[in-house]
């Protein structure tokens, strides 16, 4: 089934459709990871976006039971060079095409994804539509221009109600802005008694759960689109140790008076070197962000930049100079990607311990 | 900056000659490293015995020593140069072993030389099986059940516990020399014995076989600040059991999920950190295809063949950055030279798939055992890049130049099903093609998986190729199918065969339909950052990224994979040609497919196309680039063979024209030209049939030299002494027909002379003349060559110069030429003229300081030799004596006969230089790996035809104090001449026989001359193999024996009794 991918700049790609046959529109973004497509397509941070993978052979090891980062994928579409027809791996359960059909998400294969990536790199992230070959390009373009992309992605992917993921260790309230399962997995691994709460949970509601620590998850879109969360962080700051990842990091920055901005085409991949400014050490990190914290804006706050992206100097980590709180822009839970930064979870737990002891002596 | 400022000078150890397991990749690594260290302001001192390398050019390092890589000579250099530091990890296993030896000898301490980068203790921990296993246990990283053994007894005890099959890996050896898989006691006896012998520490690792696991490699880097990254991971298509150097490999891994990928990444980084590697390192792992269970197989704490491949596969220059890490720089402060925007700690992201296929020497060694195991057998490799697997592997297949352009064997249809199954079950060099054939016969993917253990993913892909063949056959002339086939990497030749068309017709048809490839950039970052790397590969996609500039350009064709007969020498010339083209103001574009070489380093040329060297692939690039012309004379026979096809398609060949190339290569035209020039050649004729061959040979008189026309490295060339031998040859070695004629020449016994020259049509510059130690009949590549000639008269020399000038002008040579002469009974005959760069170009260039490839390139571009400052004629001789000694890889190729003959067998070469011939020979022989003892035993088995000649050698051996040992026939002959000889039993007689003598190390030299009949069963063959396998020099040419004897004589003082008066009188009488 021939289908087309139309970009808002007028570029048209013809490819072979797979999965759902419906028309879809979204921001087109690229990810450079060579493995981990299952984690990428199920990462809620991609909510509303059409994702292309720069690696040309996708689906080689199939889709398995274990590697999802959410129950329902939130992406609007998937663009690949080649979707493996015959995956091979001992955990393989279905092919990419079978999975996309099941989930009713449109995919398109046979695209010169390198060309597409180069367009995005030059023009910045742009809107795109995957539709039938029959559609008139001009009509699609006009419609695309007229359509404003949704700004309520966090609401779409956050849990509707709180739920526990019990453990015998420290209690962590995990605010779900579109949380990857990986974060929960890491906390559970450390025996944390986790309670996952929706994105709009108030500071008081959280404090009522008597947490030892608060974790702000990753999530899709612009942090400024979730003002309730910014407010919540502002109120809770200093009361409980806090650790934020990705969107959680940006919300924390905004709550502390720094500013965020949209990047040209973002960082999405599994190979980004991040420098720890305190130790000078490099960690290779998994990243997925289209927004970042403005470096200059940090100056007037109580925040300190702890990590930067080595390649372009983007703020990748912050900590509060007064309160027990730190955040990172990248993904220490990996999945997919390297696990170099996994120690940050330990750091969070020891922050909790230190804080409890201090609390005792106060 | 963390760069070391307390050190000023650094010694770099190269890897020596090309042998199986250690090829051109170390020239690439060493060259990069030397340049990098110089860039940082250090004085670089380089030592390497291999003259055919870019790294031994005097521009690459501040002081270049072409000396034997032995403790003796390198210690001398250290004492003389007093370097502050040494980098041991760039010269392969040779460099590493030598560094360890230097440290142990105390010379490093004595001269206060610091080892940079990875510490010796780490190297030992990685290389010593016992230490390594202990470390892995400490780290909790799994290693297969194994046992370090020092005797066969210990091996048997281990097998009693774990059972067969077991893998034998000798410690501290190249490419797994002497190792293998044992399925039974017989194999265990054989392989363990050979493994223990090959290990310099008499130690082997016996390991429970995990054959069938996925074999995965990680190329990792770490700096002194403990930053560590993965440059690239690779997956072997052949599962564990086949040496990774002999495996078909893809990058990045294809069948690993992110969890598996990260699990193995974590393990690799954990190990490199625990070892404290500072630089590059290769970690090999085995992954269970059915679980998350994995094992660490081994770690190479240095740059390697895999790191060269990873560098070319990703664009990330591992050796260059490893050298900078060694002097203290860290990954976060060095820029990635590809993007110029990202840092060296950015892990490369690929957006293509790379396939590497090894190039094996079995076309030369027909009797060799072609099955693959833990002992590496390939001499070189090719790499191809594609946007899908099918494209990538098919491009790699046609890069091999092995008479295949598809998954298709010439005689595929004749093979019966049983053999097919056998060939797929047991890995061999042609397994890929047998799988293609099996799929074509309808064998299911699951069955092939069961036979081969190759992952289903790859088999599905191979099947897709076979399905496309069917599609093509069903849709002849259909453009849509054509496009799909091209996207899958099908060659026009394949499509033409299926469509019963000519290749060119398919090409034209595509051009008309605009089905042509575009070129994508290799940029380390999957297009995330703008890059300006001029490194491209072709694919049938939408967007072309190779922007043609308005500068005038010249295209240079490389020489493809390293194989016997076409080694690193041709890459050397190619690189120099590229540099000269740039210097002349043109844009230099190169096409090549060998990932090991300097020429495929994207920083060498203005533009690099990593593509197969076939007419189709080359034409696509020419269509795009529209160069001024193409240079073919530096890329060996690979490039020359493309000339005709290019001219036919209207492409201009720069330098010697196609007609003139043909005049030198086509036998009849050549003969005609020589007649015109009045230059003698051995009588000979071209035969188009067997009958004709017999007729010609009878006419000329035996012995005759027979060979197919247009050959590489004397392939299938033989000297035959009688008609029945000729008939055997015509029947077995060649397929004679009017399209493939066979040349029959009179075989002249005499001194062989080799001359290289450069001509611009008016002036002919001859940098030097080389004399071969071995008489004509031994391939020039296998002969010891001496510069300047030691035994030719002034008049002969004048004649050689005169003939060379006349030939160069008469054959219309513009650029380089190489001529082989034979001097027989005072007359000079021309054996052959190669209208191209030759094997000896780097050797001669280095000796004479005439940069031959460079000035020839300028000649090709239109500059005269005179304007470059060169006069007509022979360049004045340099002082000193220089010898080129061939190096063989026989120990790695079982069942190959080592006898020297017209067919080339050596894989590499070394240079020995000194003030006298004997000293130069000593160095050359020692550098080639030979141990020369001042006294000992020489074991002689001489064919009747050579006995007379051997007599004087025997006398001389005896007078140096060597003990002589021989089998009865030879012994009687020598005894009758009054030479004391010990008799040893013949093979098959009571033990101990002469094989035991060799095995027990009782002989230091074996001289065995050939009796006819080449079946391995012959005793001579067994003597020769036994010598090779036991590391005893075995000389099959009396000339080589004479040369070694000269060296021994010069090493020892004479011990002659005082002459008695009467004896003196007798002697005088003799002289009168």
Image (spheres, coloured by chain):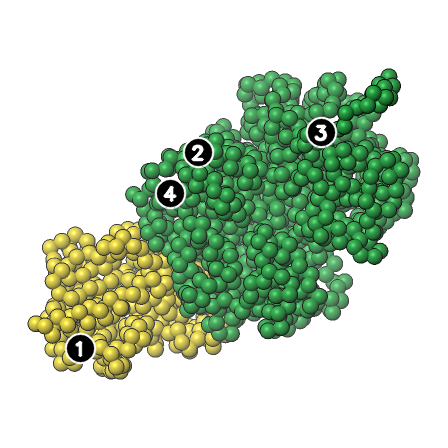
Chain colours: A yellow, B green
Check contact, mark 1 vs mark 2: CB within 8 A: no
> Which x, y percent locates residue B958?
77, 36
User: Residue drawn at (70%, 39%), measured in percent from left and top?
Assistant: B935
Category of crowding for the residue at label 4, using alpha-carbon neighbours closer than 10 angstroms: few (below 14), some (14–19), many (at least 20): many
Lower sequence index among marks 2 and 3: 2
Q: Which residue is mark 2?
A: B82
Distance between mark 4 and mark 3 Cα atoms: 51 Å
Distance between mark 1 and mark 4 Cα atoms: 50 Å
* Quadrant that contains the C terminus of chain B: top right
Callout in the foreground (1, 4): 4
Lower sequence index among marks 2 and 4: 2
Q: Chain of mark 2?
A: B
- Left or right of residue B859, residue B1024 in this image: right
Considering depth in this image, is A143 or B270 the residue closer to the camera?
B270
> Which x, y percent locates residue B894?
70, 54
Q: Chain of mark 3?
A: B
Q: How many marks?
A: 4
Question: What SS does tag 1 mark?
Answer: loop
* Quadrant that contains the N terminus of chain B: top left
Question: What SS does tag 2 mark?
Answer: loop
Callout in the foreground (1, 3): 3
Where is residue B794, by image quadrant? Answer: top right
Q: Which residue is mark 1?
A: A211
Question: What SS does tag 4 mark?
Answer: loop
Distance between mark 1 and mark 3 Cα atoms: 95 Å
Callout in the foreground (2, 3): 3
Q: Same chain for marks 1 and 4?
A: no
> Which x, y percent locates residue B657?
65, 31
Question: What SS does tag 3 mark?
Answer: loop
Distance between mark 2 and mark 4 Cα atoms: 18 Å
- Left or right of residue B864, residue A106 in this image: left
């Amino acid at each position: 089934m021939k289908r087309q991918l139309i970009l808002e700049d007028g570029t048209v790609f013809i490819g072979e459709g797979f999965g759902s046959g419906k028309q879809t529109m979204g921001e087109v973004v690229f990810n450079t990871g060579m493995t981990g497509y299952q984690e990428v397509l199920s990462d809620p941070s991609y909510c509303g976006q059409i994702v292309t993978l720069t690696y040309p052979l996708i689906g080689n090891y199939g889709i398995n039971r274990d590697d999802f980062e959410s129950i329902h994928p939130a992406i609007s579409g998937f663009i690949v060079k080649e979707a493996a027809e015959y995956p091979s791996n001992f955990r393989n359960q279905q092919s990419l095409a079978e999975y996309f059909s099941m989930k009713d998400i449109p995919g398109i294969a046979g695209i010169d994804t390198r060309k597409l990536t180069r367009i995005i790199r030059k023009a910045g992230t742009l809107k795109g539509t995957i539709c039938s070959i029959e559609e008139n390009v001009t009509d699609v373009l006009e419609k695309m221009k007229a359509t404003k992309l949704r700004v309520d992605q966090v609401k779409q992917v956050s849990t509707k109600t709180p739920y526990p993921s019990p453990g015998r260790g420290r209690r962590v309230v995990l605010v779900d802005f579109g949380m990857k399962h990986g974060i929960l997995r890491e906390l559970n691994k450390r025996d944390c008694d986790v309670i996952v709460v929706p994105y709009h949970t108030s500071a008081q509601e959280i404090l009522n759960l008597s947490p030892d620590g608060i974790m702000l998850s990753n999530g899709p879109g612009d942090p400024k689109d979730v003002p309730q969360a910014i407010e919540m962080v502002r109120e809770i700051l200093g009361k409980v140790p806090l650790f934020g990842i990705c969107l959680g990091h940006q919300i924390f920055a905004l709550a502390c008076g720094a500013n965020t901005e949209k990047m040209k085409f973002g960082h999405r991949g599994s190979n980004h070197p991040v420098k720890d400014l305190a130790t000078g050490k490099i960690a290779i990190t998994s990243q997925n962000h289209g927004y970042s914290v403005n470096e200059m804006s940090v100056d007037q706050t109580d925040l300190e930049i702890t990590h930067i992206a080595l390649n372009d100097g983007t703020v990748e980590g912050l900590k509060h100079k007064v309160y027990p709180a730190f955040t990172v822009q990248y993904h220490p839970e990996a999945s997919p990607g390297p696990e170099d930064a996994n120690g940050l979870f330990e750091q969070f737990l020891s922050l909790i311990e230190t804080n409890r002891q201090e609390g005792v002596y106060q | 900056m963390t760069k070391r400022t307390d050190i000023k000078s650094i010694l770099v150890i190269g890897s020596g000659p090309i042998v199986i397991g250690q090829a051109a990749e170390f020239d690439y690594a060493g060259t990069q490293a030397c340049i990098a260290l110089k860039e940082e302001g250090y004085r670089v001192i380089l030592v390497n015995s291999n003259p055919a390398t870019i790294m031994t050019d005097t521009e690459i390092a501040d002081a270049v020593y072409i000396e034997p890589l032995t403790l003796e000579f390198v210690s001398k250099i250290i004492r003389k140069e007093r370097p502050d530091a040494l980098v041991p990890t760039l010269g392969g296993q040779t460099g590493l072993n030598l560094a360890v030896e230097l440290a142990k000898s105390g010379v490093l301490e004595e001269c206060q030389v610091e080892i940079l980068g990875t510490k010796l203790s780490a190297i030992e921990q990685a290389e010593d099986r016992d230490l390594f296993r202990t470390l892995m246990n400490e780290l909790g990283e799994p290693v297969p059940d194994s046992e370090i053994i020092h005797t066969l007894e210990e091996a048997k005890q281990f097998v009693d516990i774990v059972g067969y099959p077991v893998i034998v890996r000798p410690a501290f050896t190249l490419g797994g020399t002497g190792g293998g898989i044992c399925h039974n006691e017989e194999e265990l006896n054989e392989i363990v014995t050979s493994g223990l012998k090959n290990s310099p520490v008499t130690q082997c690792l016996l390991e429970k076989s995990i054959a069938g696991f996925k074999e995965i490699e990680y190329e990792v880097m770490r700096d002194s600040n403990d930053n560590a990254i993965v440059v690239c991971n690779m997956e072997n298509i052949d599962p564990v059991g086949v040496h990774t150097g002999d495996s078909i490999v893809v990058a990045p891994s294809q069948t690993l999920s992110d969890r598996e990928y990260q699990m193995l990444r974590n393990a690799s980084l954990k190990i490199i950190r625990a070892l404290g590697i500072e630089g590059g390192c290769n970690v090999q792992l085995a992954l269970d295809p059915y679980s998350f269970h994995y094992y660490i197989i081994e770690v190479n704490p240095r740059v390697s063949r895999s790191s060269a491949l990873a560098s070319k596969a990703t664009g990330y220059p591992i050796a260059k950055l490893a050298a900078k890490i060694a002097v203290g720089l860290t990954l976060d402060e060095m820029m990635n030279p590809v993007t110029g925007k990202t840092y060296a700690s950015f892990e490369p992201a690929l957006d293509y798939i790379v396939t590497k296929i090894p190039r094996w020497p079995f076309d030369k060694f027909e009797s060799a055992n072609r099955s693959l195991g833990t002992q590496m057998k390939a001499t070189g490799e090719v790499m191809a890049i594609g946007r899908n697997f099918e494209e990538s592997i098919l491009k790699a297949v046609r890069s091999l130049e092995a008479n295949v352009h598809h998954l298709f064997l010439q005689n595929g249809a004749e093979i019966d099903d049983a053999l097919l199954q056998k060939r797929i079950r047991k890995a061999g060099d042609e397994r890929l093609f047998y799988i293609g054939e099996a799929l074509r016969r309808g064998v299911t993917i699951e069955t092939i998986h069961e036979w081969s253990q190759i992952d289903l993913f790859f088999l599905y892909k191979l099947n897709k190729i076979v399905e496309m063949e069917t599609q093509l056959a069903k849709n002849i002339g259909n453009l849509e199918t054509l496009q799909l086939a091209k996207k899958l990497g099908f060659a026009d030749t394949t499509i033409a065969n299926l469509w019963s068309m000519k290749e060119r017709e398919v090409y034209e048809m595509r051009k008309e339909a605009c089905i042509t490839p575009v070129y994508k950039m290799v940029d380390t970052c999957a297009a995330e950052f703008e890059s300006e790397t001029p490194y491209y590969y072709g694919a049938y996609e939408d967007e072309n990224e190779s922007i043609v500039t308005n500068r005038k350009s010249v295209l240079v064709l490389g020489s493809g994979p390293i194989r016997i007969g076409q080694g690193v020498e041709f890459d050397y010339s190619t690189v120099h040609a590229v540099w000269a083209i740039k210097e002349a103001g043109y844009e230099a574009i190169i096409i090549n497919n060998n990932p090991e070489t300097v020429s495929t380093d994207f920083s060498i040329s203005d533009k690099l196309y990593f593509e197969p060297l076939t007419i189709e692939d080359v034409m696509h690039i020419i269509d795009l680039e529209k160069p001024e012309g193409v240079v073919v004379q530096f890329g060996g026979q690979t490039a020359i063979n493309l000339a005709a096809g290019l001219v036919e398609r209207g492409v201009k060949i720069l330098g010697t024209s196609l007609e003139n190339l043909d005049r030198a290569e086509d036998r009849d035209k050549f003969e005609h030209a020589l007649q015109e020039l009045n230059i003698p050649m051995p009588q000979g004729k071209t035969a188009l049939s067997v009958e004709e061959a017999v007729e010609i040979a009878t006419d000329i008189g035996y012995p005759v030299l027979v060979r197919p026309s247009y050959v590489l490295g004397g392939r299938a060339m033989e000297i035959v002494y009688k008609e029945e031998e000729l008939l055997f040859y015509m029947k077995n070695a060649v397929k004679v027909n009017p399209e493939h004629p066979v040349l029959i020449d009179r075989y002249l016994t005499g001194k062989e002379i080799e001359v290289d020259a450069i001509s611009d049509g008016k002036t002919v510059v001859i940098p030097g003349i080389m004399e071969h130690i071995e008489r004509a009949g031994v391939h020039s590549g296998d002969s010891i060559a001496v510069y300047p000639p030691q035994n030719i008269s002034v008049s002969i020399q004048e004649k050689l110069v005169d003939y060379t000038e006349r030939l160069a002008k008469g054959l219309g040579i513009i650029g380089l030429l190489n001529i082989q002469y034979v001097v027989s009974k005072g007359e000079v005959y021309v054996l052959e003229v190669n209208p191209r760069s030759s094997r000896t170009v780097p050797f001669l260039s280095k000796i004479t300081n005439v940069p031959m490839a460079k000035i020839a390139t300028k000649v090709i571009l239109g500059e005269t030799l005179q304007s470059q400052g060169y006069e007509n004629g022979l360049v004045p001789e340099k002082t000193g004596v220089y010898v080129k000694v061939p190096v063989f890889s026989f120990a790695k190729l079982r069942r190959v006969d080592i006898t020297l003959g017209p067919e080339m067998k050596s894989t590499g070469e070394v240079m020995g230089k000194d003030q006298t011939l004997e000293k130069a020979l000593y160095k050359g022989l020692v550098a080639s790996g030979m141990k020369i003892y001042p006294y000992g035993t020489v074991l002689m088995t001489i064919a009747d035809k050579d006995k007379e000649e051997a007599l004087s050698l025997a006398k001389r051996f005896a007078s140096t104090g060597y003990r002589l040992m021989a089998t009865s026939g030879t012994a009687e002959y020598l005894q009758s001449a009054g030479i004391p000889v010990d008799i040893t039993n013949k093979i098959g007689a009571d033990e101990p026989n002469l094989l035991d003598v060799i095995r027990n190390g009782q002989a230091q030299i074996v001289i065995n001359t050939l009796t006819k009949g080449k079946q391995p069963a012959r005793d001579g063959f067994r003597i020769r193999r036994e010598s090779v396998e036991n590391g005893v020099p075995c000389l099959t040419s009396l000339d080589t024996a004479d040369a070694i004897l000269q060296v021994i004589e010069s090493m020892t003082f004479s011990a002659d009794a005082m002459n008695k008066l009467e004896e003196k009188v007798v002697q005088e009488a003799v002289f009168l």
